[in-house]
Image (cartoon, rainbow, N blue to C red):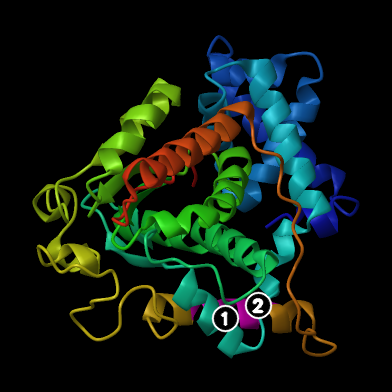
Amino acid sequence: MISVTKNMGDLRTEDVCGCAATVESQYAPLRNNVFVSFLYQPAGITRLWCCILLAYNVHQGNLRGTLVRFLKAREWSVPKAHKMLMDCLNWRVQNEIDSVLAKPILPSDLYRAIRDTLLVGLTGYSKQGQPIYAFGVGLSTFDKASVNYYVQSHIQMNEYRDRVVLPAASKKFGRQINTCLKVMDMTGLKLSALSQIKMLTMITTVDDLNYPEKTETYYIVNAPYVFSACWKVVKPLLQERTKKKIQVLYASGRDELLKVMDSESLPHFCKREGSGSSRDSLDGVDCYSYDHPFHQQLYNYMKQQSLNQYSAGPRKQGSVHVDVPSPGLEEVKIAETIKAELQNLRGSNGLTHSFNSIQIEGP
C-alpha cells in the first residue's frame, strides 16, 4: 500500500510509471467517457497521480471507483470533481490520515466511553454483500470526551471500513463491493439534543468532502412523530441524488429491511417491533458495545498498527487533532433550517416529544 503521508518522496519512478501505464492501457479506449476525461484535461497527470495515491488507500486500489465517486459527488463536473479530489488529498496529507489507524484512542476505558456515546456498529452484510452499519442517532450523546476524540473515532471507523471491511466483503462475496448500507435509529432523539447538531454537522462535513458516495442507502427507522415536520423543510434542500438514497421506514422497518438483508444481519433495534430502545439487545451485547466482536477487532487492529509503526515504544495518550473542513453552503443551510424548525416546534407548544435530525450525507 502506498502511504501518501510517509512515502510520497520515496515513491519510486518505476512504481508510478507502472501504475500510470496500467491506467493508460485500461482506459485509453474509453477516453470519451466523462470519468476518463478527468485524466486527460490540462494538468491531467496531476489528476492521475492524485487518483492513484487515493485509490491505494481509500478505494481498494480501484482507480475507476475513486474517479466515479468524486464525479458523482459533483454531478459529473470534471473541474469541480478535480478540486474536490485535490482538497481531499491535501486534507489527508496535512492531517496524516494514512496513519490514523496506528493511533488508537488510549486508555481503553476512554475508548469504551466513546463507544457508549457515539453509537455505531457493524451488524452484518446485505444480500448483495454490502456491510450494514447501525447508527443510534437518537441516543448518541457525545458527552464523555472532547470533540477531537469523537472526530478521530469517526475517521478511524471510515478508514477501517475502506481498508479492511470493504476488501473483506469483496473477497467474501467474490465481487467488488465499494459501498455500505446504514440503518439510522432515531429512538430517543429529543428537542434537548439540539446542541448535538454541531457535532453531527462536523461529522457529516468530513464524510461529504473526503469520503463521498460510500453509502448506497440510508434507512431511517423508529422516527418520532415530529420527523415529518423536519423532513418537510429539509427535503427540498437536498440534491436529487441524496433524496434517492434516503428511505424512511415505518416503525422499526423490519419487514422492509428483510428484503435486503437476512434476519441475522438486522440491527438489534429492528428485530422486534416496538422494542423502544436502541440499547435493547437480544444477545446481551449490542453492536455498539466496546465488547462486540467488531469493535474488539477494530481496536486490536489499531493497537497492532501502532506497535508496527511506533516500535520505539507505546504512543502517548491524547487525541489526534484533525482539521474539519468548513461545511458547504448546502450543509450550512440544512443545519440552520433544522435548528429553526426545532426551535419553532419547541416554542410553539412546549413539545417535549422526540424529533428527528437525520444524517443526510456521508460514507
Amino acid type of disc 1? Tyr
- The quarter of the picture where residue 320 lies is bottom right
Dot 2, how many residues are within 10 Å of its Cα: few (below 14), some (14-19), or many (20+)? many
Image quadrant in which the N terminus is located: bottom right
Label 1: few (<14), some or many (≥20) within 10 Å?
some
Residue 27 position within the rendered picture, expressed as x and y whole percent measured from the top left = 58, 23
Residue range in magenta is 297-305
Above or below residue 31? Residue 222 is below
Q: Nearer the viewer, residue 97 or 274?
A: 274
**Disc ID at residue 343:** none
Circle nearer the viewer, 2 or 1: 1
Q: CA–CA distance between discs 2 and 1? A: 8 Å
84 w.r.t. 39: above or below:
below
Mark 2–mark 1 CB contact (< 8 Å): yes
Residue kind at label 2, given as amino acid type:
Pro
User: What is the x, y in percent for residue 7?
Assistant: 83, 56
Residue at 31% x, 54% y is: 183
Residue 64 shows in this picture:
no
How many callouts does the rendering have? 2
- Camera-side residue: 351 or 300? 351
Q: Which mark is residue 104?
A: 2
Residue drawn 11% across and 67% down? 272
What residue is shown with label 1?
Answer: 111
Left or right, 91 with respect to 226, comes to right
**Residue 123 magenta-highlighted:** no
Q: Quadrant of residue 55?
A: top right
Q: Is residue 144 above or below residue 275?
A: below
